[in-house]
Image (spheres, rainbow, N blue to C red):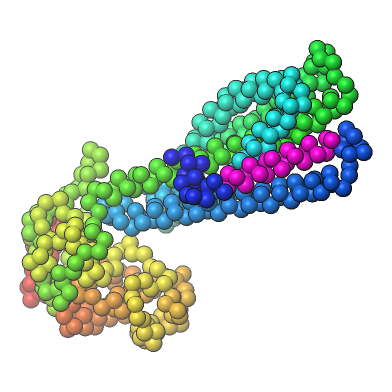
Amino acid sequence: MSLLRALHTEAGSQSRRVIAAAIIAGMASALLLVTVSKVVEAPGAGTVDTFVLYAACLVAYVSSARHTSHRVTELIESLIHRVKVQISEKVAQIELDGLERVNAAEICDRVTENSIIISDRAGDIATMLQSVVIITCAMMYLAWLLPPAFTVVLFVGVAGAWKFLDVRRDFITQVRQTFARRLTFLERMTDLVAGFKEVQFGRLRRQEIREHILQSSAALRAASIQSNNLFADGKLVADAILFITLAVVVYTLRRFILLDASTLTRVVAAVMFLWGPFMGLISGLMPYIRSNLAFSEMNALDAKLAEVARAGAPVPNPPDPWQDGMKTLKVCGLEYEYATGPESFRIGPLDLQISAGEVVFIVGGNGSGKSTFMKVLTGLYAPTTGSLEADGIPVCRENVVSFRDKITAIFSDFHLFAKIYGLADINEEAVRRLLVGMRLDGQTSFSRRSFTKLNLSTGQRKRIAMVIALLEDRPICVFDEWAADQDPEFRRYFYNELIPTLQKNGKMVIVVSHDDRYFHCADRVVTMEYGKIRSIVQVQAVQRPT
């Protein structure tokens, strides 16, 4: 769908009013030309009635043009808002494995940069609509004034439009290349920021990444220069058309047609009058092309997300079969497989049952499948085969949202929101007590459902995440390497005090850990290797640290 058609749909029944206002603005502008021409031709015609007509046309032009510009701006912003909401809702609806197949940089670029491109050109698009009407009215006036001059202007205009189409085709190609180069550059910058720690270890790596970013930036610069040059060429074509038209009228037309000075003056004035709206049309058309391409990029992203969402999106408001709590969590023959081109990674088959009030540690080396297992166990990934059951009820697309509502999880790659979402009633005093218990009262504070400062160390941020987890008070608690970034004091607190407290409160506690000296804090230790469960050991069989 083109941008103009989308704006027409967005306007609904009000589109006629916008078009009518643009027509009135164009006709009023043309009448201003006619009125001035008559006064110039016959100075005695400059009566009070003529001045009143001129003033009325001016008021009509200003008010109608203002209405058109403001309304088009409102429609464009409403359209952008609607598309943004659509995209954000689709992102929220799709499953984690689907989202991981979409480039995060693409989502950010398409939503932000393209929105800015469209928004910034709202005034140009309104000017373009008005210019079409003004040019039409001026051409009608020229046809009435001198038909041969109208024919000449029309012929030159058509020839110029033909040339402009060549520039337009090249412009569209170049703008698309610019969009692609911009996305590539954003991906490179995202790599630099996300992998900043890794970049610091190795001068050669740092140099190669720097060169890659410079290459991406240079390619974007070249594409931007080319597209802007073509943009300028489009305006030059418009200038050339008007200068050629003036030359034909002044130097050629008068050789074949007997023209008096008055008629020639009015013809030249009409052609000069065309200059403004014609440039407005060209100045609006090129940005419209760019905005239309940006809008198509946003629609393409929306369609891609919709396609991913259709591949097993959960039911948004399902019934809750676990309203009275959750006693057991069980996986039977569970398998999950990543499919990434020719390579794949599989976990399973896995069989495990966890009960309320039980503490289970999941251990294993890097690449053993712990994190993937946690994502399947918490309903973030749907099993490829096998089943995940809670209290004997299979977790499936129809109830997975309700299942996730019973889980509080802190993953190793957790994200910390500045504001606490999802808790209707928050006791600020309780939050402050938890912050004091986590020794964060001097680092951040809590007010109006938000933490005042999050620019803290990883360990401190994990403690804030733990505060939120304790406030959520859900039956299943999953902690993925929570203690890894804590000092010895808080590591002891986590294993020796916090976990026993959660267990005493009947929580199902699942901990991914490498801290073998604290394995005695678990009821069972599940060891994973190569995506499978190698062993399940009761705590009394685990060797205590000396």
Quarter occupied by the N terminus:
top left
| Magenta segment boundaries in residue numbering | 18-38
Measured as percent of width and height from the top left, residue 64 is found at: 66, 49
Measured as percent of width and height from the top left, residue 337 is found at: 18, 49
From this view, report whether residue 422 is shown above or below residue 532.
below
Q: Which one is in front, 110 or 544?
A: 110
- Answer left or right for 225 relative to 411: right
Q: Is residue 134 shown to the viewer in this render? A: yes
Residue 383 colored magenta? no
Q: Residue at x 41, y 72 (%)?
A: 419
Q: Which one is in front, 164 or 116?
A: 164
Q: Residue at x 87, y 38 (%)?
A: 39
Quarter occupied by the C terminus:
bottom left
From this view, report whether residue 443 is shown above or below residue 347.
below
Measured as percent of width and height from the top left, residue 248 is found at: 77, 19
Count of marks overlaid on the render? 0
Q: Residue at x 35, y 54 (%)?
A: 91
Q: Is residue 511 shown to the viewer in this render? A: no
Which image quarter: residue 357? bottom left
Q: Which one is in front, 65 or 517?
A: 65
Decide whether the magenta segment is chiefly helix, strand or loop: helix
Residue 33 colored magenta? yes
Q: Point out the residue furthest to the front here.
A: 49
- Answer left or right for 195 relative to 121: left
From this view, report whether residue 479 is shown above or below residue 313.
below
Q: Point out the residue furthest to the right here.
A: 44
- Answer left or right for 522 relative to 49: left
Measured as percent of width and height from the top left, residue 438 is found at: 36, 81
